[in-house]
Amino acid sequence: MSYAAWIIMTASLVGITCSIIGVLLVLRRMAMISDAISHTVLLGLVSAYLVTNSLDGLAMFIGAAITGVLTAVFIQLLNSAGVQADASIGIVFTFLFAIGVILVSMFARDVHIDTEHAIMGELAFIPWTTVEWFGLPPIPQAVWVIGIVLVINIVILVLLYKEFKLSSFDPELAAALGLPVVFLHYVLMGMTSITAVAAFDAVGAILVVAMIIAPPATAYLLTERLWMMFVLSAVFGVISAVAGYYTAAWLDASISGMMATMTGILFILAFLFSPTHGIIAKRINNRRIRLSHKLSVLLSFCFEGSRDMIIYKPTY
């Protein structure tokens, strides 16, 4: 495959993997947890380096995944203690990310772990880091990692689809029926953490957050069926990746930044032109309702007037 094809494939896999997880996060109104997790994994990366004194990929992955899960646990603890959800996310996110930045600046200055790479990523370097597994030709490591995470996420979603569906729309009913709502919550948080970590090194935190939130939010405006939300979210993730790459190449701009921009453009288009929830459709519908109301009032007035004329019998 060509250089550009590997970049597009990697970004498309990130778009699919992040967006299908984002559907459940958007429905549960927990989308910004992805922002917290995608930033706090920096603490896990630098902690793994300080413990192992190496940049081994597995150690980094485990450290970042543990930090992501701990982020979700701390947010849930603060939320359970009465702190508002958005405040809990803000406190944990800034605290853990700041610790990661401090540790990088103090103990990892000579290592290629830097905050700019953590936030923006660099898709252009993806094709250069390849591995040869199962006798196949060299394939970028990021494709393997993200592809494996995608398969894991799909298997979990298929096995727990009904449970996730009920607990997302009506957690009280799910708890009353005996479903392990708390367990499902932490399974979802674990999936979010692993997904964010897998995509983190390749695309950076900004694109991870954009792919987790924007495609599901766009799909939410276009359908009311959960399975269709998963499909549309994945499609929008791929479209954003492909369109973002070619636009970035045309404008000589950041690839990750342009892909994130495309997710926002797709959302704006759906926000304006969605047949059911779009602003234009709502205005047309409201105008139609007002016109129908005026017409019904006019017809009612005409009917009342004609009835009075029929009932009235003049006497001579």
Image (tube, grey):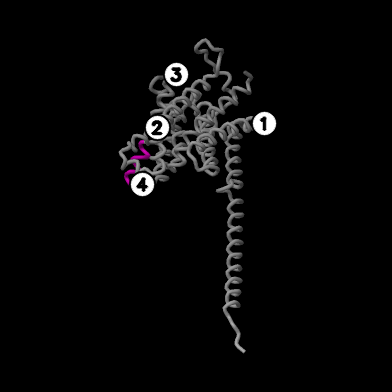
Please report whichever mark, 4 or 3, sits nearer to the chain's N-terminal start.
3
Please report whichever mark, 2 or 3, sits nearer to the chain's N-terminal start.
3
Please report whichever mark, 1 or 3, sits nearer to the chain's N-terminal start.
3
Q: Residue at x 61, y 74 (%)?
A: 306
Identify the residue position indicated by label 4 in the image.
83
Marks 1 and 3 close (CB-CB < 8 Å)? no
Q: What SS does tag 3 mark?
A: loop
Alpha-carbon span between mark 2 and mark 1: 43 Å
Alpha-carbon span between mark 4 and mark 3: 38 Å
**Residue 56 numbered tag:** 3
Q: Is residue 230 magenta?
A: no
Identify the residue position indicated by label 2 in the image.
160
Q: Amino acid at mark 2?
A: Leu
Is 39 or 156 nearer to us in this picture? 156
Q: Residue at x 61, y 61 (%)?
A: 291
Q: Amino acid at mark 1?
A: Asp
Q: Nearer the viewer, mark 4 or mark 2?
A: 2
The dominant secondary structure in magenta is helix
Is 310 or 255 nearer to us in this picture? 310
Identify the residue position indicated by label 1 in the image.
252
> Is 194 placed above or below 129 here?
below
